[in-house]
Image (cartoon, helix red, strand yellow):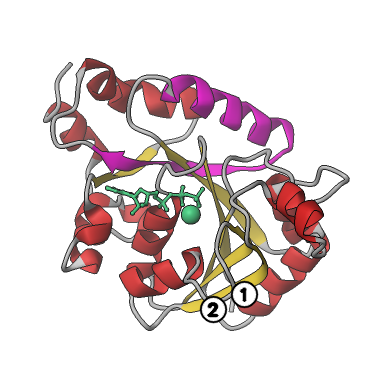
Amino acid sequence: MTATVLFVTGTGTEVGKTAVTAAVAALAPSVAVLKPGQTGVTATEPGDAEEVARLAGPHVTIRELARYPEPLAPDTAARRSGLPTLRPQQVADAVAELASVHRLVLVEGAGGLLVRYDADGHTLADQALATAALGLRVQVLLVASAGLGTLNTTALTAEALRTRGLDTLGVVIGSWPADPDLATRCNLTDLPRAAGAPLLGALPHGAPHSPDFPTLAKSFLAPPLGGTWDAAAFTAAHPA
Ligand SMILES: Nc1ncnc2c1ncn2[C@@H]1O[C@H](COP(=O)(O)OP(=O)(O)OP(=O)(O)O)[C@@H](O)[C@H]1O
Ligand SMILES: [Mg+2]
């Protein structure tokens, strides 16, 4: 089985990476979701991987490699808790194991792209490169916030990905507001330019509370992610 591996990063924390990961997973018949480093939850609380399973459904295999209680970057949280950090190779090996039995493996980072996972400064990008070095097909999905400020953080992230030789499949807006302002509407045109990659979806605000999340996911993710969303039509419906 030739698996696709998608590393899901964001323009920052709380932009909707987990929600978008769940939406992609909901539409994929054979899928595993890995959250390498989960911070900000205790041993008994549900983490992002459990949230994905709740939203996407029981067909999703979920894995987490390390968990740190404080809501900090993984390296900082590890240092303060005395727990071991995660090396890129550990993540790559876990992805390879999941990729041997699933067609799609989604890996959700913590915060934005250059958040550190260990004292040497390794990031989600290094985990993606270590995974690619195993011969797996690796791409990045960039989750962006919708409004003013997102063009800069999107461009910075895209540049960091390009510099490292990582391929961006596309951009998804994590939370599209019910009443988008001018900047938000303009971003439909400018976000794919800033990212150098196509816009592949826009999850409506409130999506994680939808009673039928998989159906919503299908309507708001583009065909490369298994849905029916049409970026051009959506942009035309929200003129600036
Ligand atoms: N489309 C949306 N509409 C409304 N709320 C949303 C949407 N997407 C996400 N949220 C909410 O915003 C918060 C952050 O979303 P989410 O957990 O997906 O972000 P994240 O980027 O994964 O954050 P983290 O960096 O902590 O992993 C959550 O409370 C989530 O329920
Ligand atoms: Mg998350």
4 sits left or right of 199 in the view: right
Callout 1 crowding tier (Cα within 10 Å): few <14, some 14–19, many ≥20: many
Up the image or down, 19 lies above or below 205; here it is below
206 sits left or right of 24 in the view: left
- Residue of label 1: 99
What's the CA distance linking mark 2 and mark 1?
Answer: 5 Å
Callout 2 crowding tier (Cα within 10 Å): few <14, some 14–19, many ≥20: many
Labels 2 & 1 near each other (Cβ < 8 A): yes
Q: Is mark 1 on a helix, strand or loop?
A: helix
- Measured as percent of width and height from the top left, residue 225 is found at 37, 56
- Measured as percent of width and height from the top left, residue 172 is found at 38, 43
The amino acid on which the numbered mark 1 sits, given as a three-letter code, is Ala
- Measured as percent of width and height from the top left, residue 149 is found at 42, 20
Foreground residue among 238 and 177: 177
Q: How many labels does the image show?
A: 2
Q: Which residue is drawn at 64% across and 47% down?
A: 72
Q: Quadrant of the C terminus?
A: top left
Foreground residue among 233 and 22: 22
Residue labelled 2 has its Cβ within 8 Å of some atom of ligand 2 = no
Q: Quadrant of the N terminus?
A: bottom right
Q: Which residue is drawn at 18% across and 27% down?
A: 180
- Measured as percent of width and height from the top left, residue 123 is found at 73, 46
72 sits left or right of 25 in the view: right
Q: Is residue 185 magenta?
A: no
Foreground residue among 121 and 21: 121
Q: What stretch is highlighted in magenta?
A: 150-176
- Residue of label 2: 102
